[in-house]
Structure formats: C-alpha cells, structure tokens
Image (cartoon, grey):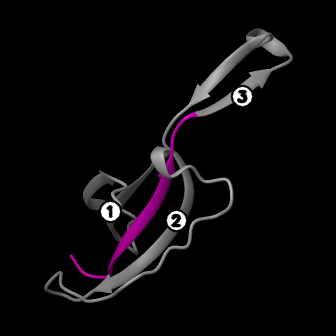
Amino acid sequence: AEDLTLWLAVVESGFETPVGRGENARRTLHNDHVVRRLLPVLELDSNGGGEGSLRIDAEPGWKDGNLSFAAFVQDRKTLRVYAAASTGLTN
C-alpha cells in the first residue's frame, strides 16, 4: 500500500454522564475509550517505514490513571486501516 499515515489517539475512560430527559432519564451513563486527541504521527514511505517523534502534553482534567493510547496505520486515499494497536499509559 502507498500513502499511509500512522495515527495516534489519546484515549480516556471513566466518564459518567447524568441524563435528565428521554428514555435514559434519571440514569447515569458510563463512557469508556473516549478519544481526547487524534494526531497524525508520520507518513510512511513505500516500504512501510518512517521516522518521527511526537510530544503530547496532558490537558488539565485528564486523569493519568484513565489514559491509554491507540495507534493505527491508514491509507490516506481509501481510508482503509491496515494495522492497529493499543497500550496503557506507563510512568
């Protein structure tokens, strides 16, 4: 494949949303794996290789213990995803 980009998503879990109206009124919804930031890391060459670095500064309100990362390789033209991986945040 050509024209590939490696993307990184900063993901946070542990959100709660109280619902006031509708079919879920008076309930609390629990939300996990919410994408807080999505960043293109690098464009891969025709051999699938490349080099890059990325610095991510945490936003106020992000909870370190609830953060993880997901990465995926995507074709820029067709949007097909060729590979994906995830990991938790380690100090």
Q: Is residue 4 magenta?
A: yes
- Report, in whole angstroms, how far the alpha carbon at label 3 lies from the one at label 1: 28 Å
Nearer the camera: disc 2 or disc 3 = 3
Q: Which amino acid lies under the numbered mark 2 shown in the image of this protein?
A: Leu
Q: Is residue 28 left or right of residue 49?
A: right
* Nearest to N terminus: mark 2 or mark 1: 2
Q: Are marks 3 and 1 in contact (CB under 8 Å)?
A: no
Across and down, in percent, residue 68 comes to 41, 52
Circle on res. 17: 3
Which quadrant of the rendered structure holds the C terminus?
Answer: bottom left
* Nearest to N terminus: mark 3 or mark 1: 3
- Report, in whole angstroms, how far the alpha carbon at label 2 lies from the one at label 1: 11 Å
- Report, in whole angstroms, how far the alpha carbon at label 2 lies from the one at label 3: 22 Å
Which quadrant of the rendered structure holds the N terminus?
Answer: bottom left
Task: Say which element carries label 2.
Answer: strand
Circle on res. 38: 2
**Number of marks in the rendered image:** 3
Q: Which residues are magenta?
A: 1-14
Task: Say which element carries label 1.
Answer: strand
Figure quadrant of residue 40: bottom left
Nearer the camera: disc 3 or disc 1 = 3
Circle on res. 72: 1
Seen at 64% across and 64% down, the residue is 59
Across and down, in percent, residue 11 comes to 48, 52
Disc 1 crowd rating (10 Å Cα; few below 14, some 14-19, many 20+) is some
Q: Which amino acid lies under the numbered mark 3 shown in the image of this protein?
A: Thr
